[in-house]
Image: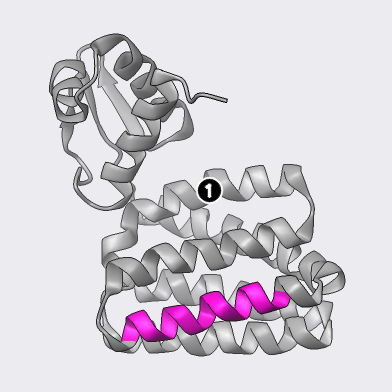
Amino acid sequence: MTESLSNQARRKTEELILKGSLAAGAKITERDLAERLGMSRAPVREAIRELVTVGLLEQISARQIVVRQLELSEVREIFEIRGMLESRAASLASERITTEQYKSLEALHLEMKTTATRGEFSDYFDLNIAFHTLIHEIAAAPRLATLIDQVMRESLLFRSRGLVDEANIRSSIEEHEQLLKALRVGDAELTSLLMRRHIQGGFNRLELI
């Protein structure tokens, strides 16, 4: 199935935002964004409208749209919600994970360790998202995964504030290793607890206070 132009525009704009190419507070216009994406203004207009709805962009006035900037209280709440939702997904995943799925998670983890050693923080960030997303898929709870995806996208507005420090990366890796051990033995309660602590650790690593 061919991806629609509006979906392409949304996906490409999301990538620009989540990779930090469009910083928090940056002004967004249809014309400038269309030129940057090499697309016409109609699909870009629709993409902007959708990104306002999901919270990555914010409409300040009828003529002004910016990349959303979050207050500390908002960021804290987003991570608290992520902790609740992702801990549930981790618990379900621990009960449903197959050997092949575990191997896939382990492979992602090993790849993250390699990129961290090389100082490839952007690649580590992308792999980290893939690691969490796979856990959500393993949980086999589509509605839960949709809710998690929404709050994750909001929290990723701060991607440049967390996983760019060697000590933070090291902590993240250690937490993933603990999660893998709990998933391997199928301990739902421990996996849930570790995931909640991991998400809280992610908030702490933002160093917003």
Residue at 43 percent of width and 87 percent of height? 171
Q: Residue furthest front?
A: 1
Q: Is residue 76 above or below residue 32?
A: below
| Kind of residue indicated by mark 1 | Val
Quadrant position of the N terminus in the picture: top right
Q: Which residue is mark 1?
A: 151
Residue 209 makes an appearance in the image: no
Q: Is residue 108 covered in magenta?
A: yes
Q: Nearer the viewer, residue 77 or 127?
A: 127
Q: Which image quadrant is residue 88 in?
A: bottom right
Q: Nearer the viewer, residue 197 or 164?
A: 164
Residue 63 makes an appearance in the image: yes
Residue 199 image point, x, y percent: 54, 70
Residue 102 image point, x, y percent: 71, 77
Q: Nearer the viewer, residue 62 or 13?
A: 13
Q: Is residue 130 above or below residue 64?
A: below
Q: Which secondary structure class fits the magenta region best?
A: helix
Q: Is residue 42 above or below residue 124?
A: above
Count of numbered circles on the image: 1
* Other residues around mark 1 within 10 Å, as few (<14) / some (14–19) / many (≥20): some
* 194 left or right of 162 in image: right
Give the residues drawn in magenta, as a range.
102-116
* 156 left or right of 33 in image: right
Residue at 52 percent of width and 73 percent of height? 200
Residue 5 image point, x, y percent: 39, 19
Q: Is residue 149 covered in magenta?
A: no
* 17 left or right of 3 in image: left
Local secondary structure at mark 1: helix
Q: Which image quadrant is residue 16 in?
A: top left
